Image (spheres, rainbow, N blue to C red):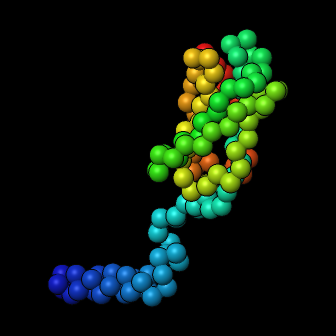
């Protein structure tokens, strides 16, 4: 009798496994859900500020791709603004500014961040 129960349980388990495989994992009630990928491009912009929170013109802003290690740069405008277009949303980037030996903290533009417009101020220290 006990052997028959084990055989029936094994058969039931095999039937459930076959159903999951035939319908696909997305239809399985206990299948983990995949996270949506950020595909496309975004803009990265903001303002470079000095220690007194005043806009800083002429600062160099860097955007470094963590995967390829390539670096893009932008010189802040007269009102301290910077802007990078066509930034790949599927990759991570480091963002920082430098001027006259002063540097801001490094900020991460993460591939997990779904914002199409990433806006951040960079304060020189």
Place of residue 55 in the rendered image (x, y in percent of width and height, measured from the top left): 78, 21
In this rendering, is residue 78 above or below 89? Answer: above
| Outermost top residue | 52
Left or right: residue 37 versus residue 44 is left
Q: Looking at the image, is 15 positioned above or below residue 67?
A: below
Q: Could you tell me which residue is drawn at 54 percent across and 52 percent down?
A: 91
Dividing the picture into quadrants, the one containing residue 45 is top right
- Vertical order, 102 against 1 (above or below): above
Q: Residue 15 at x, y = what percent? A: 37, 87
Q: Where is residue 106 in the image (x, y as percent from the top left)?
A: 55, 30
Give me the residue at 61% from left, 55% from top.
88
Quadrant for the C terminus in the image? top right
Which quadrant holds residue 14? bottom left
Q: Position of residue 103 (x, y in %)?
A: 58, 21
Count of picture labels: 0
Which quadrant does the N terminus fall into?
bottom left
The residue shown at (60%, 43%) is 72
In the rendered image, the residue lying farthest to the right is: 79
Q: Which residue is drawn at 37% across and 82% down?
A: 17
* Side of 7 relative to 123 (left or right): left
Locate residue 22 relative to residue 113 in the image: left or right.
left
Whether residue 120 is visible, yes or no, is no
Q: Nearer the viewer, residue 32 or 65?
A: 65
Q: Can see residue 96?
A: yes
Foreground residue among 119 and 97: 97
Instruction: Please tell me whether residue 25 is drawn above or below residue 69 in the rendered image.
Output: below
């Amino acid at each position: 009798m006990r052997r028959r129960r084990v055989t029936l349980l094994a058969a039931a388990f095999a039937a459930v496994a076959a159903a999951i495989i035939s319908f696909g994992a997305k239809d399985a009630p206990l299948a983990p859900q995949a996270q949506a990928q950020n595909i496309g491009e975004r803009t990265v912009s903001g303002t470079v500020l000095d220690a007194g929170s005043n806009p800083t013109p002429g600062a160099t802003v860097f955007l470094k791709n963590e995967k390829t290690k390539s670096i893009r740069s932008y010189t802040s405008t007269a009102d301290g603004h910077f802007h990078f277009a066509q930034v790949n949303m599927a990759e991570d980037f480091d963002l920082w500014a430098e001027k006259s030996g002063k540097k801001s903290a490094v900020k991460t533009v993460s591939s997990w961040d779904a914002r199409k417009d990433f806006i951040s101020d960079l304060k020189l220290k």
